[in-house]
Amino acid sequence: MRFEVIILGSNGAVPTPERYASAQLLRSEATDLLIDCGEGTQLQLQAAGTGLGRTDTVLITHLHGDHYFGLPGLLTSLSLQGRTTPLRIVSPPGLRAKLSPLLELDRWRLPFPLTFQEHTATKLSLLTMSGELEVFSFPLRHRIPTNGYLIRERPREPNIRKDKIAQYAIPWTAIPDIKGGGDYRTVTGKLVPHTELVAPAAPPRSYAYCSDTVYFAELADYVRGVDLLYHEATFLEDMADEAAQKGHSTAKQAAQVALHAGAKQLVLGHFSARYRDVEAHEREAREMFLNTTAARDLYHFTVPYAGRAEVAGK
């Protein structure tokens, strides 16, 4: 039951040989989502040994080039690879107008339907669904309109208890109704309540992507209880003033969000190219939120599947 994030690019505006511009691939059991698409994303997909064959949606946070300049080349490559399945790109308004001239210059008609969904988040709201995933958007505070994204598995149905199937001789035809919330009446007329017949399903796993943003306390409410939180940490705390002026956060501020949100794990990213390594970011954040990792390109972060809930007394 896969639910993992591959870091394709962990740097800020200026890529380096070790750190590409912002891009991530969230992989679930049935579908994948590409989140941001900085320069070189298609090369990083190749390096990661994966592609976009299971991806129907690309989420772009905002229209600064380090978050979408990889799209023209990627779309062209998908065409050359023979893609025919539809692709949707979600972003704040204006992306279609920026990309269309480039695609026209190439004089290559895309062999797959490409749609643009423009959206400016103003609150936490359900934006779309992809496979078994729900995609929510929420506002970030940057120099231009910027969306954050919360991606969560759809709630699963409870698990039918095999011991109860045997105890009450429940036919297989009755199981869908029971899992959907129904009670069961035996052949002798006894009514067995739904709660006795099922065990709770594993809780939905979740991932939140907070790209370019200044620190603001309300952000924690949008991502409360998230399993895996990615938060930009362009600067260290000694440059907090410059971070605020440029619409960015520090590693310490990212840790504050994770702590106040009750996140289970924090991943830092979008590092300024002035930092040759990011170990100091990791140390700074861990002083406040221990379960922190500074992203490195091609790292995988996995949220494990909790499995079937244990039944009391079993």
Image: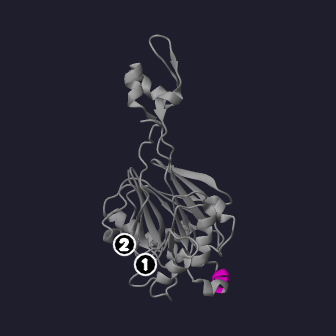
User: Element under label 2?
Assistant: helix
Q: Are marks 1 and 2 in contact (CB under 8 Å)?
A: yes
For disc 1, the neighbor class at 10 Å (few under 14, some 14 to 19, many from 20) is: many
Residue 12 visible in the current orientation: no
Mark 1 lies on residue: 20
Residue 233 in picture, x, y percent from top left: 55, 77
Q: Amino acid at mark 1?
A: Tyr
For disc 2, the neighbor class at 10 Å (few under 14, some 14 to 19, many from 20) is many
The residue shown at (64%, 86%) is 242
* Towards the viewer: 40 or 288: 288
- Residue 64 sits in which quadrant? bottom right
The residue that label 2 is drawn on is 44
For the residues labelled 1 and 2, the Cα–Cα distance comes to 8 Å
- Give the SS element for disc 1: loop
Q: Image quarter for residue 103?
A: bottom left
Please say whether residue 139 is one of the residues in the magenta stretch. Answer: no
* Rendered location of residue 293, percent (x, y): 47, 72
Toward the top, the furthest residue is: 188
- x and y percentages locating residue 13 in the rendered image: 52, 81
